[in-house]
Amino acid sequence: MQGANKVTIWVITGLMAVLTMFFNLFIFLMSLKSYKQNKHWTPCETIITALSLANGAHQLLCYLWMTMTEIDKDCRLEELFYSLMILTVFSLKFTIMWTTSFLTFYYSTKLVIEPIHCYTKIQEAILKHVTTVVLVIPMCGLSTCLPMLTVLVPENNTSENKDCGSIMPNDTPGMIYNTVYLVLSNILPGVLMVKCCISISVHLGIHLQHMKASTNGSHAPKLGTEMRVIRMTLALVVVFLCFMVVDLYAYYQVTVKKENAILLSFLFTSIYTTFSALVLIYGKKTFWKVLLHSYNVGLDEFPCLSCLKVPETKCKPSSAHTVKH
């Protein structure tokens, strides 16, 4: 990758890093506030908090590595130091993918209730062991990434293409490991999320049919409380699938064209963590309301930007059938 392109990616990633850290710090602080008020976290709050921490840590390490490789162009520090940073970044990426998938799976079990009560049993198990699962996922990510140091080799073909500590597959074991990592970190959680997305969509379709057939509108309040979660979950799946497509492109660059595309991979992941954090904030109504209020208060300091304000409440219809949530 040429030097000018590397600097451009570094700058864009920096902008994404600011947004990612802001959104995830906001989620973390709001979760702490909720914990202080309620003295406990709900399962979804536990998962979201863990995800925000993983997103933040990933972004910090990712941008730190990119900054150090721009400053230390001669790689005066030990290659192992840089390689360990990359290993940690990919481990955190694994954690982010599976934690997001776990969150989607949790919501699918919460929204979809099968007649055989299979989902009910799974939900009960999740409620009992959600903290354990959230802690096991990073451990699995670290153990999955440790072989990188042995099966992948440093990639330093030319001085222009040199990224300190960059490791790439150079033989059959390295190619096999790269493929296995891709399947475990991207494809499997993606399949699980798509399955959950289909289940939720089918549930929504059935629910709408019941509402249409109902004469007293008794389903409306429940759908109102579910709709935000459904939109958030489906949006998370869409954002993830878009990320997976571009990440597969970066994988293609590495394995087929033998190009060092690690910066592209970091950029794509940074964009993903930014948009997924925003979707998570939207999914929690209290978080979204506070964010919109803070945004509008900030714009109050600049009267010339008042046109950019966002309405904090929806205009209620004048119909007598308005449902209270």
Image (cartoon, helix red, strand yellow):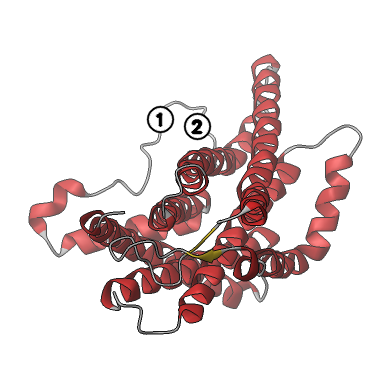
Residues at badges 2 and 1 in contact (C-beta under 8 Å)? yes
Residue 30, can we see it?
no
Disc 2 to disc 1, C-alpha distance = 7 Å
Residue 122 in the image: state x and y as whole percent.
84, 49
Camera-side residue: 54 or 219? 54
Outermost residue toward the right in this view: 116
Q: Residue at x 83, y 63 (%)?
A: 128
Residue count near mark 2 (Cα–Cα under 10 Å), binned few <14, some 14–19, many ≥20 = few
Q: Residue at x 10, y 57 (%)?
A: 303
Residue 324 sits in which quadrant?
A: top right
- In the depicted structure, whether residue 158 falls above or below residue 77: above
Residue 301 in the image: state x and y as whole percent.
15, 65
Residue 316 sits in which quadrant?
A: top left
- In the depicted structure, whether residue 66 falls above or below residue 3: below
Q: Residue at x 55, y 71 (%)?
A: 88
- In the picture, the disc for residue 322 is 2
Residue type highlighted by circle 1: Pro
Badge 1 element: loop
Residue 173 in the image: state x and y as whole percent.
67, 55
